[in-house]
Amino acid sequence: MTSPPDLALFFGRFHPLLVHLPIGFLLLLAALELLGRWHRFRNATLANGCILAFTVPASILAATCGWMLSLGGNYDPQFLQWHKWTGVGTAVAATLAALLYAMGQSTFYRWVLALTVAVLTVASHLGGSLTHGKDYLTRYAPGPLRALLGGEDAPRTPGPAGSQTGAVAGRRAFADVVQPILAQYCVGCHGPEKQKAKLRLDTLEGMQAGGHGPAFLAGNSAKSTLIHRMTLPLADDNHMPPDGKPQPAAEEIKLLAWWIDAGAPADRKVGELNPPPDIRRLLDSRLGAPGPVAQVVAPKPLNDVLPQIDLLADELGIAISAIAQGEPWLQANASLPGPQFGDAELARLAPLAPNLRWLDLAGTSVTDAGLSAVASMRNLVRLHLEHTAVTDAGLAQLAGLDDLAYLNLYGTAVTDAALPHLRALPRLRQLYLWQTQVTPEAARAFAEERLDKAELQGWKAEIEQLQARIRGRQFTVEFGATNLTVSPTKVVDPL
Amino acid sequence: MNPVADFYRQQSRRAFLSNTGIAAGRMALATLLFPDWLKAAAPKPGCAHPPLPGLPHFAPRARRLIYLFMNGAPSQIDLWDYKPSLAPLFDTDLPDSIRQGQRLTTMTSNQKRFPIAPSIYKFARHGRCGTWVSELLPYTAQIVDDLAVIKTVHTEAINHDPAATYILTGNMVPGKPSIGAWLSYGLGSEADNLPAFVVMTPRWSAKRDAQALYQRLWGSGFLPSRHQGVALRSAGDPVLFLNNPPGVDASTRRTMLDGLAKLNGLAFEQSGDPEIRTRIAQYEMSFRMQTSIPELTDLAREPQAVLDLYGPEVTQPGTFAASALLARRLIERGVRVVQILHREWDQHDNLPRDLPLQCRDVDQACRGLILDLKQRGLLDETLVVWGGEFGRTVYCQGELSRTNYGRDHHPRCYTMWMAGAGIQPGVVYGETDDFSYNVVRDPVHIRDLNATLLHLMGIDHRRLTYSFQGLDQRLTGTEEANPVKGILA
């Protein structure tokens, strides 16, 4: 097939603009005709001749442009065929209706108009499906309605994060990492329904076949069109996805590049590809935390839990409020009712668990048993347990609170035996142990062990580089006998 | 006169329709954006009330504020702003190039000359950060590694009343809400049996009368009056008339209050005056405070080691040390803002006699408060601010001798410190000239300071507003103000 002339495509692209004119005209005509049957509105149809005079050229023009656009290809051929013929049918039927009207055959005219609207409805739906994808209309429909409409009962988006559990290492690199990203950003235009540039990114074969050449070069992401196009500046005409469409995050592009560099395998597992630490972290956060049970618990939208917030705050006599505008996180302060707040009350906070970020249980009668409720608050960052009955054994349950940064245990019965349990808290930065049985030696050893030495080493290298740069800025003037060196007055102290 | 009837009489049909249309649209929008907005409008009895919808604007670093206000203006030259180069300039005239014809108070504007009075106190570097501190603050010097010392705070006011009103309410003209009232209004109150904002006014040791304090320094201005600070008395009962009179027990008092609340409720339905609601809430609060205040002031369970931190005066009610300890106990009980106003730092004369006495009042307790908050893990969530309303002059007011001098008011630069939540510890911010007279680098207007306080509490100072007299009023006023990024952690 020879490629169509540019001029045809130029006019063709006016199709989406023009096509809505006859749609509006025809629906208006039908509405006015229906209205006119009612005596009170008998004059409603007076202008219909005039409207028909607009409708006929508009529908012929729209159909012509549509035909030209179809020459460009890139669409699902079966859908396209149906849309093309129903569209032409609409134009023909509209013309016929206008002729009948001009001949004064008003009954025939009304029947043909009804037929035109029916064909138009089918043509419009097919056109919408071509542009937006065939489940565009039904995707967010309520379940039963979607089943009725024949929509797929699939998850809304090929879920990238947290939808399944399981060790990250055991997940498939292409199917579980790469495909969801492509499905989210690319397959809308390069998939089963549209194949812009004759490219399909929904299957590995499609990617290998490519559009203008293969989409990737296995083992070399830098020379892969896919990555190249995605990392061009947004303003560049060749940037993909096009400006205005949702853009993948830098991390997502990084994951695609990692998979290509690893040879773009079809069915290898993540673990077999031995990802470097930074990729490993990205994978962990996309596919759920490492370990078979662990999973990232996403906070619920705040509006969904608002009624519970008010109810619980009232009934338990505690303060619960949003931490910041526009974020789902909550803080709860149960220290005010004090001992009246115990394990039973704590368990009632369960519906808010994924949203709780700061929790103050100071001085409450919470015990080790109650900490199982805290363990389910996976997004907790600050936790006050001072002056409670918690003991070393109870703290073991806190393992898995991966975001916990602040833990206050002062005035409790914890001992040195608590510290090993706290090793499982990767982000813990502040720990308060005043008035406990923990010995200063053990606390110091724990702090030493927790010091992020690797990070400090990184800074040290950075500081040395900075110092080298500062030395590079010195200015020397030669006087023959004396040598004058001017350096910046304050030099950064090394660590 | 019935205000509701008046209101209806003044409404024209046209005005009513157009206003209601807009109001209904606004309500619809507000309920869309903040579904709990209508609920928030009706206050519960007791003192706890939720934050305004949409607040905090961003995640706060500080949940509470303790403001140690040194009323009268501590001399920055004798405490923090070390100027060794002044020593040889003793009794020489302040160069005009420094004063630049600046407006002076009437206390020194008639002086024939402005002789430089170097500080007679020794300074030393302290802590790992090496901050210079005067020998008058030996205890505070031990905690400089926890403080951000700002040497370039400045203001426009040159007299106590407008200056204190300015820094604590954002405007020299009385009538604006205080910082604590704004925070209570915006962030709400968690404690059900204590007010959101508590004020203490401990006694002082300088041998002279102090400047008066005014309720407006902790008032609520045009905000609903439930947000005003509640001042605890420094001697005797902390809150007057809180105890039941003889022969009245708690249940009788409860019955009386319930009846009174019903009557007040009727009055509210008639006139719609929101102050009636405040009154109902305050009766309810007082009833709860009958138990919460005695518990608050009972120090029996404080270990001796903790009391020792605050110094020997901690057990004498009405001292700064006792107030500092109460401040810690208040924030532990859910109070959002505690303000201690320590008076008489106004050393116009006899500075060497009075300033050491004033420092002794607060020095050890400041350190005690910081250390006590720190060991409890509370300093990480509490912002502590120390400072006065302006600074003091480098030149002497009155007779200058080698051992005695006085200093007048100086608005162009003075020193404050902040510590705790979100504050970068161990920094000195800003630089003044050799005379501690003008700011050389990094000025911090008191508006910037207040913007910083709000920032740390999770509030964008430009967006916490209250419509009054045709202006969206805010703590930082209409002029530009910016949080001081250089002291933020």
Image: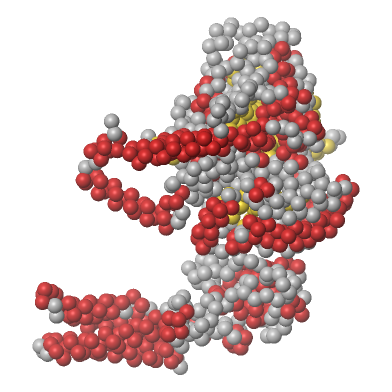
Taking the view exactly as shown, the residue that stands out farthest to the bottom is A1
Residue A175 occupies quadrant? bottom right
Taking the view exactly as shown, the residue that stands out farthest to the right is A441
Q: Compare residues B470 and A238 and report the one nearer the observer.
A: B470
Q: Is residue B4 visible?
A: yes
* Residue A252 in the image, given as x and y percentages of width and height: 63, 70
Q: Is residue B150 visible?
A: no
Q: Is residue A81 left or right of residue A49?
A: right
Q: Quadrant of the C terminus of chain B?
A: top right
Q: Compare residues A411 and B301 and report the one nearer the observer.
A: B301
* Residue A285 in the image, given as x and y percentages of width and height: 67, 68
Query: Residue at image x 73%, y 26%?
Result: B315
* Residue A465 in the image, given as x and y percentages of width and height: 78, 52
Query: Residue at image x 54%, y 48%?
Result: B56
Query: Residue at image x 73%, y 74%?
Result: A292
Taking the view exactly as shown, the residue that stands out farthest to the front is B247
Q: Compare residues B82 and A401 and report the one nearer the observer.
A: A401
User: As displayed, is residue A60 above or below residue B7?
Assistant: below
The structure's colour scheme is secondary structure
Query: Residue at image x 51%, y 58%?
Result: A306
Q: Compare residues B467 and B157 and report the one nearer the observer.
A: B467
Q: Quadrant of the N terminus of chain B?
A: top left
User: As displayed, is residue A396 above or below residue A492?
Assistant: below
Q: How many marks?
A: 0
Q: Is residue A167 left or right of residue B98?
A: right
